[in-house]
Structure formats: C-alpha cells, structure tokens
C-alpha cells in the first residue's frame, strides 16, 4: 500500500464558517506531503473557497476537487418546518463537480439554496437535484444524511427506497459514504450501509469528515465551535465534535477501514471522475447596448469622451487632445471600452436619479473617466498619470470604485439588473476574519 492509495473527499476549510479550522494552504501542503493524487473541498452550504482551493492545489501538484456539503430539505425547499419526526429541516448531502457542467450545476444549486430554500441554513431539495444532477458525483454524507437517518430510525427497507431514488437521479455517480470517528451512532448505522452495499451493489466510499488539520488541533477547534454556538467549553450540552475529524493520512484510513478496503479504493475511482478545469484571466463583462448610429464600443466611447471633455474641461488644450487620444488607444488595446461605457452610464443614471456617486482610487488619473463624468477631477490640471490606472502591461482588469450611500445601493443594483439582465450581474462578498483582539475576547469567554 502506498500513501497515495486514498483521497480525501469530505473536507471542511475555514470557509465552513466558525466550524472548519483548516486553512486551505495547509490542506494543500499536507495532501502534497502525503503524495495524495487529489483532495476535495466540501464546505457547508457554500463555495466561498472554491477558487482559492483550486489555485492552491494546482500550485502543489494535487488535483483539486470542488464540492459542497449541501443541506437537502426533507420535504420541499419552500417548507419552513421540520418533517417526519426529525428535528432538523434538512439532511446533509455531498456533491462533487466532475467537470465544468457539474461546477455550473453546483453553483446553481448552492445559489438556489440561499435564494429560495434558506431556513436556518441554505437548503435545496430533490426537485432541484433532478434538474441539476448532470456532471455531479453524489455521496450520501455523514450520519446527518438522509440514508443514515433512515437506517437508524425507519430501517433498511426505507433506506433502500432512498438509495433507489438517488440512483435514479445520479446513476452510477451515487455512492454510499461511510465514516468512522468513534461516534456511537456511526457504530449503529455503518452495518446498514455495508448491507446496502452488499445487497444493492451501490458502491461504498470511505471518508473522514475533517474539520481541522492535526489531531492536536481538537481543543482549538472545540473553542471555535463554542464561539459559534455561544457556549463555554465547560457546558455539558455544547455541540462537540469527536477528536477524529482531522485530516487523516492514508495509513490511518486503511487501519480504520481494514474490513472494507474497497471503500478506500473507491476514493481513487471518484477522483478519476473529477476533472474540473477552471479558466482564469477571462473577462465576461455584459455587452453595452450601442445607439444605432455607432457600430462599435470604441467609436461610441470616443464620441462620448470628446463631447464630455469639451463640456467639462475649462479649456481644451492640445495636451488634452493628445492625452485623450492616448487614453482611448490604450483602452482599445486592452479591450475595456465597454467597461468605461457601463460605468459612465451608471454614473449618469445616478446623477439623474439624485444619487450621489463618488469615484475614488487611481481612476481619477483618467481623462476619459473625467470626460464621462465618472470622476470629478481633471487629471491634466493636477499632473496625474494615466498609466497608474491602466497600461498595456497591466495583467488584471482595472477597477473603478463608486462610493454611494447605503440607502441608494439597491436602486443602482435594480438599474443594472434591469439593463443587463440578472444573469450578468452579481454581488461580491466580503469575509470578516477573526482579529487578534476579538479572538482573545471570544476565547476568554468560552474558557470561562
């Protein structure tokens, strides 16, 4: 047996907020150190870490598998009550993207979970699974999954019916997930999973529900979970993970599952199925609608900029003319005329709607931005260099930040959604991190 004879397919990073304590870089380094051919990211209900995970894994030569441990509503995602005597309103399910189609479907499922199914957690349902199953591998999840619940509460026949339903949705890409962390419920449920494997032929896959990197991180992780739940470490009723939910080695996993080694071999089979390739450096800005009298965004931007310069500049000098030509040429070379038109139109709408929008940053060094009304400073008067904002050697796309009042934010979002279509507009998330001062306060509380 080699150390690379196992792949982690159920791993939580720090993006399982206040629940996962694994830094993505640390997971990548550990997987590479143990010569694992691949590793999966399956955070709770989100894909926040997908890009970072993909890049870090690629950097160390480990195949990244992008997944998510989703919450599947027991009845409908629109239902807002627990069902069938189960306290929770959802079951867990692990989904892994095989390819770009699967990744798009996973994004859709996760998004719909927040938009339509949110009830304590972002929930999907089997209706959505049927619509977006293509390109996905499905694992039955931990003891919080539907099939483990049925084995424990309703018996093996009810579990068989659920297995058949998942097989109908995912075909050969559905697997029974078995875990061993020393939990009493696992000891009761696992024989049922093995029986389903033997009697129905559905393949068994062994995973470890890793939430922290090393075994010795257990106490620190316990403090993190206590912070999340508002409990202290002395509270006997606090949520408590077993010590075994760390990123185990292949050797440790084979010792745990020596009676079902085929369940570990299945991890390699699944890893071979998952070959998602992400393309970076491509921009997908919406197309700005041009007036009928213009054939290209270049021409329209040039026309608007010249008219705007004549209107806004106190005196238009030869230097202004040369600078405008220079900027327009660079903007054309870099392929961003549409971006300037979109921003100029947004600022125009803001002005007409009585919304104050103020641009900041290096964009103030652009005469084109000033001519379009995006900025309020003539860069020629202040000796500002356009190259600080945009030049042909710049790798990343320039960005123009607009500061607006919170009360007006929704109006601008509604405008761009209406103009460019909901599929072409998204919002960017900001993650709050735990600063040293706050951590000391929170840890002191849970240790009280």
Image (cartoon, rainbow, N blue to C red):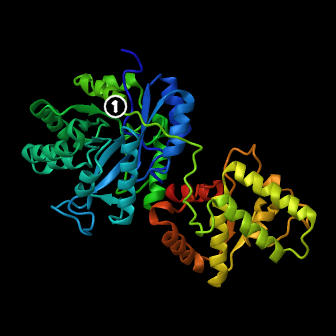
- Camera-nearest residue between 149 and 263: 263
* Residue 444 relative to residue 11: left or right: right
Place of residue 43 in the rendered image (x, y in percent of width and height, measured from the top left): 42, 47
Residue lying at the far top of the rendered structure: 1
Q: Is residue 254 above or below residue 98?
A: above
Q: Is residue 56 above or below residue 74?
A: above
Report the residue at 22% width, 65% height from top: 82
* Residue 438 relative to residue 327: left or right: left
Q: Which residue is mark 1?
A: 273
Where residue 177 sits, quadrant-wise, is top left
* Residue 67 relative to residue 133: left or right: right
- Camera-nearest residue between 130 and 205: 130
Report the residue at 40% width, 48% height from top: 104
Q: Helix, strand or loop at disc 1?
A: helix
Q: Pointer 1: residues within 10 angstroms few (<14), some, or many (20+)?
A: some
- Camera-nearest residue between 324 and 182: 324
Q: Does residue 163 appear in the picture of this structure?
A: yes
Q: Does residue 231 appear in the picture of this structure?
A: no
Place of residue 187 in the rendered image (x, y in percent of width and height, measured from the top left): 21, 38
Place of residue 48 in the rendered image (x, y in percent of width and height, measured from the top left): 49, 51
Report the residue at 63% width, 72% height from top: 346
Give the position of the N terminus as an image quadrant.
Answer: top left
Where residue 183 sits, quadrant-wise, is top left
Residue lying at the far left of the rendered structure: 157
- Camera-nearest residue between 33 and 406: 406
Report the residue at 47% width, 53% height from top: 17
Q: Is residue 78 above or below residue 46?
A: below
Place of residue 121 in the rendered image (x, y in percent of width and height, measured from the top left): 36, 61
């Amino acid at each position: 047996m080699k150390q690379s004879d196992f792949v982690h397919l159920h791993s939580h990073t720090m993006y399982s907020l206040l629940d996962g304590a694994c830094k993505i870089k640390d997971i990548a380094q550990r997987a590479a150190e143990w010569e694992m051919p691949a590793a999966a990211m399956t955070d709770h209900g989100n894909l926040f870490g997908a890009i970072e995970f993909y890049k870090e894994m690629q950097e160390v030569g480990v195949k990244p598998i992008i997944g998510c441990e989703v919450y599947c509503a027991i009845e409908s995602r629109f239902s807002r009550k627990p069902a069938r005597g189960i306290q929770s309103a959802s079951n867990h399910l692990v989904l892994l993207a095989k390819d770009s189609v699967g990744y798009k479907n996973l994004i859709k499922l996760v998004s719909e979970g927040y938009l339509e199914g949110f009830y304590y957690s972002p929930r999907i349902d089997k209706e959505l699974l049927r619509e977006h199953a293509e390109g996905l591998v499905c694992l039955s999840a931990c003891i919080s999954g539907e099939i483990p619940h049925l084995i424990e509460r309703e018996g093996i026949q009810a579990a068989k019916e659920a297995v058949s339903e998942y097989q109908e949705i995912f075909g050969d890409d559905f697997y029974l997930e078995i875990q061993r962390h020393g939990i009493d419920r696992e000891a009761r449920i696992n024989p049922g999973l093995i029986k389903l494997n033997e009697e129905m032929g559905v393949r068994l896959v062994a995973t470890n529900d890793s939430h922290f990197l090393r075994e010795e991180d257990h106490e620190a992780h316990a403090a993190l979970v206590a912070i999340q739940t508002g409990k202290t470490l002395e509270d006997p009723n606090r949520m408590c993970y077993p010590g075994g939910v760390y990123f185990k080695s292949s050797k440790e996993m084979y010792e745990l599952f020596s009676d079902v080694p085929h369940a570990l071999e299945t991890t390699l089979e699944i890893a071979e199925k998952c070959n998602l390739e992400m393309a970076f450096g491509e921009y997908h800005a919406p197309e700005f609608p041009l007036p009928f009298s213009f054939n290209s965004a270049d021409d329209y931007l040039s026309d608007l900029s010249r008219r705007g310069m004549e209107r806004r500049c106190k005196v238009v000098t030869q230097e202004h003319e040369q600078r405008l030509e220079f900027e327009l040429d660079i903007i054309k070379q870099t392929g961003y005329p549409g971006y300037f038109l979109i921003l100029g139109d947004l600022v125009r709408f803001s002005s007409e709607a009585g919304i104050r929008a103020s641009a900041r940053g290096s964009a103030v060094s652009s005469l084109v931005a000033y001519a379009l009304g995006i900025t309020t400073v003539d860069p020629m008067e202040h000796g500002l260099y356009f190259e600080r904002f945009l030049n042909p050697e710049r790798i990343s796309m320039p960005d123009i930040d607009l500061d607006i009042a919170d009360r007006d934010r929704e109006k601008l979002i509604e405008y761009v959604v209406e103009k460019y279509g909901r599929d072409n507009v998204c919002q960017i998330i900001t993650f709050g991190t735990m600063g040293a001062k706050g951590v000391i306060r929170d840890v002191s509380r849970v240790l009280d």
